[in-house]
Every structure is written in C-alpha cells, then in structure tokens.
Image (cartoon, coloured by chain):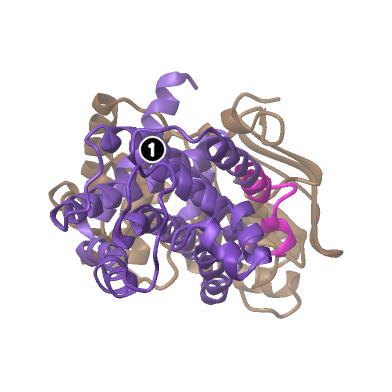
Amino acid sequence: MNTQTALSIEDLSFSYSGKKALDQISFTINAGECTILLGPNGAGKSTLFSLITRLYDTHAGRIELCGFDIQKDTRHALAKLGVVFQQTTLDMDLSVEQNLHYHTALHGLSKKVAQQRIQQELERLNMVDRRFEKIRQLNGGHRRRVEIARALLHKPALLLLDEPTVGLDVPSRLAIVEYVHQLAKEENLAVLWASHLIDEIYPDDHLIVLHKGQIKAKGTVDAVLESTQTTAIKDAFYNLTQGEHA
Amino acid sequence: MNLMHYWRAMWGIIGRELWRFITQRERFISALVRPLVWLFVFAAGFRAALGLAITPPYETYILYEVYITPGLIGMIQLFNGMQSSLSMVYDREMGSMRILMVCPLPRWFLLLSKLLAGTGVSILQVYVFLIIAWFYDIRAPLEGYVWILPALVLSGLMLGALGLLLSTFIKQLENFAGVMNFVIFPLFFMSTALYPLWKMKESSVLLSKLAEYNPFSQAVEMIRFALYGQFDQHAFLYTLGAFTVFMAAAILGYNPSKGMMVKKGGPN
C-alpha cells in the first residue's frame, strides 16, 4: 500500500434487512487530496460514513485508514480519523474550550499538548477570544468552526465531513469551504466531504458520485466531466443520477 | 494507546458529567425533591399505618422514616441510572454519542466510564440527601457514612448498567417514557425499599418472592446494611451478578456487529 494513502475502500457492500445500501464500492483518497462525495438523498453517503467511523460493522469488503484495517485494528484506524458529523455534536452547555478539552481527553492528549493544540486551532479559525463562550451563544457558522477545530486536535490523517455546511448562510458556508480546502493543501490532510452542493467543489478536487449505493463516477473534476461529456458538474451529476437533484 | 490514555479519557468523561450536573441547578434540585417528598410526606403519613419488628441491621424499634431511607437512596440511584440512559438516547439522537464512539478506545471502556460518571453524580445526590436527613434526625452511625460509599458505587453501576441496556432497545426518545413506567415503578414498588419482605409475605407470597429476586431489592439491602456498618454478602453478590449480566448485555447491544444499532436499520 502507498504510504500516502489515507483511506482505502475495497469492494464495500452493506445492506439493511436485505436492501442494499452500498454495492461493491471501491476508492482511495491520498494525503493532500480533497474528495467530494456527491449523491442525492438515499445514495448511501451516511451509510458509508457510519462504516468508515465503525458505527456499523463492515460485512463485506474492506476499509483501511493509513493501512490500518478498521475491522481488525479499529483503535489505530480511528486514531487517524477526524470527523465532523452532519448534526452538531457539541455540548451546548459547555464552553468552546471545555468541548475541545473533552475531545483531547478522549484522545489521550496531555493537558500541556491539549492546551497548545487548542490555542493553535482556535487561532487558525480566529476564535481564540471566544474560547470561554458557551456553544449555545455561538451562531451556526462558529459552531461548525469549533467542530472542525475539534476534529483536527489529535492531528488526524483523514478528515471526514458529512454535509457540514447544511443550514449555514452563504458567507459562513464559503468560509468553511475555503478553510477546508486550504487545510488539505497546507497540512497534507486527506479530506472526504459529503455534499449536496455543487458550488462547494473546487476545480482541483476529486469527485465521487454515489447513486443508489453504487459509484457512478470517480476521479478529478476534469476526468468526470470528460467521461460524461459535459462541461459543468451540474450536468454531469444530472446525467449520472438520471435527473435526481444533488 | 497506553494506560494514561485510558485514565485521561475516563476523567474527561466523568468530569464532563459532573460539571454538567453541577451547572444544571434545576436537575440537582429536582433530583433531591423526589426522595425528600417521600421522606417528609409519604413516610411521615405512613408511620402510623406500618408497625415494624426489629430486624437486622436494626437493633431496636425504628421509625418508618429510618426504614425507608435506604430505599430512597436506592430510588435516587434508580432514577439517576434511568436518567443517564435517557441522556444516552438523547445523545444518540443528537449525535454526540458518535463523538464518544469514534474515539480510539474499546467500547466497553467508554461505556463503563459513562456509567462511572453517572454513578458519581448519583453518589453526590445521595450524600446531599443524607445530610438533609441528618437534620431531620435520621442518623446512622458515623462509620456507616463511609461504608455506604462502596455499596453506592456498586448499586449505582448496577442500576446504570440496567439503564444502559434499556437504552440499546430504545430507538427514539419518545418511547422512553413508557419504558420508564414499565421499569421504574415495578422495580421500586416490588422491592424492599418501602416495606420489608416479611411484611409483604403476610399479604402475598408471590409478591414477596418477586421482591426477593428483584435486583433493586438486593441493592437496597446492601445499602441498608452498609449504612449500619455491616456487610450483607448475599445482597452484595446478587448486585454484583446483576451488574455483570446487565453490563455484558449492554456492551453487546452497543457492539456494531451484534448490537441493536444495526437491527434498528439505520444510523441515528
């Protein structure tokens, strides 16, 4: 395996009571790559995320994070993973700093290291002066920023984001899209971003189009456009999913 | 992945739970009001109706309030155990359970830490209750207040594990109220918390048998004896056994391959 491969998925299938949610999907994501997972509702995006985070067991196929099998070497694999879930998973009644300290404790970081990393991540997001505020007092965009900061505290190799911009206003959305793309480049971080929104895709991103549990297209934006003989992602997506909206 | 990691994570989980409890003043007060109403109103009213013989660990005739106190301690822990599992269902619905579940530690350890955190909160409530009871002239020997601590840890863990187990069966928060009624009330009323076994036997042998096998009864008896500096081996072993069974089943329930999460057919 390539040491730069952060996530490798091989022949992954999953069913709910006989109904296939994922059907033999395979792909890899390398360090520094930002991969956008596009798919309409019910495409299997949430199931895929639940399998990568091992909330569900993998029944068929294989998932590896930095070479660690999620099934056999769960803890090493999970240590390489940072996640931002679709719903806010912050504790509303705790402060920004308390929420972040809780996460560093779960990842076994010492107080000193935790303090340094929290400072560093909050500085990067311009949120140092809000560290003592309760999450309840923050707006949606700032809550999302805290969640991204939290996901990075233990220095993961892969950042998973499950539609993190849902419900945000346009400026907050753009700021987060920009920030995550910058992270992938500067920190050599692999990113898997599930999205509905085509304007969140940058020209040098990689794309995976998932529909009814199957990968309909994957590759760079140009490669997907070429394979679908279209000039816009919107059209490519429309063709691949036979008219369903993202 | 060393011992320090386990230690830090456990204290992170316990610290978060204690902080939340201390800052949620309403929760603190309502957790205390329930047993106090039982003590000041129910027990006072019932005093005349129920005559109690001298039974161990008591060495003399006692007031009904004295008898009921260990039962009310059990009640605090029972409600607390159910409340922590309620918060687990809530956390699962809200997604914050996922943050716990994706951290790189074994699931059994994370669940046990959650249970310890809930037990810690219940022990805080119990000691505040005992202080108020002291001023109401319900007093145990001083060493009893120390001996009760390990008993409270075990009973808290057992009742918390039961709550945890229930939380694996409940998909939505709305279903919880029904289960609370079907679990809390039978456990509490079919136990030795309010009346001793011999008294129950006078009215119904079946009821007394049910109460005898009820793990909540055994937890209450363990607490009762500990409060008077005595060790009830049978109650201790029974409570320990019940904790082991409930905990094992709850861990199985939260296991991604065998658990209820998969049977429910979708991520929450």
Residue nearer the viewer, B73 or B179? B73
Instruction: Judge from the rendering whether residue B111 lies leftward or rightward of residue A207; answer left or right.
Output: left
Q: Position of residue A69 (x, y in %)?
A: 69, 31
Q: Residues within 10 Å of mark 1 (few under 14, many from 20)?
A: many
> In this rendering, would A153 be left or right of A210?
left
Q: Residue at x 74, y 47 (%)?
A: B257
Q: Which residues, given as a range, are shown in magenta? A: B247-268
- Return the chain for callout 1: B
Q: Can residue B150 be spotted in the picture?
A: yes
Q: Which chain is brown?
A: A
Q: Is residue B264 inside the magenta stretch?
A: yes
Which residue position holds label 1? Answer: B226
Does residue B145 belong to the magenta stretch? no
Residue B233 sits above or below residue B136 on the image: above
The quarter holding residue A97 reads top left
Extreme residue toward the right, this view: A18
Q: Is B100 placed left or right of A42 in the picture?
A: left
Task: Give how far across and how far down residue B226 sits, in percent.
Answer: 38, 37
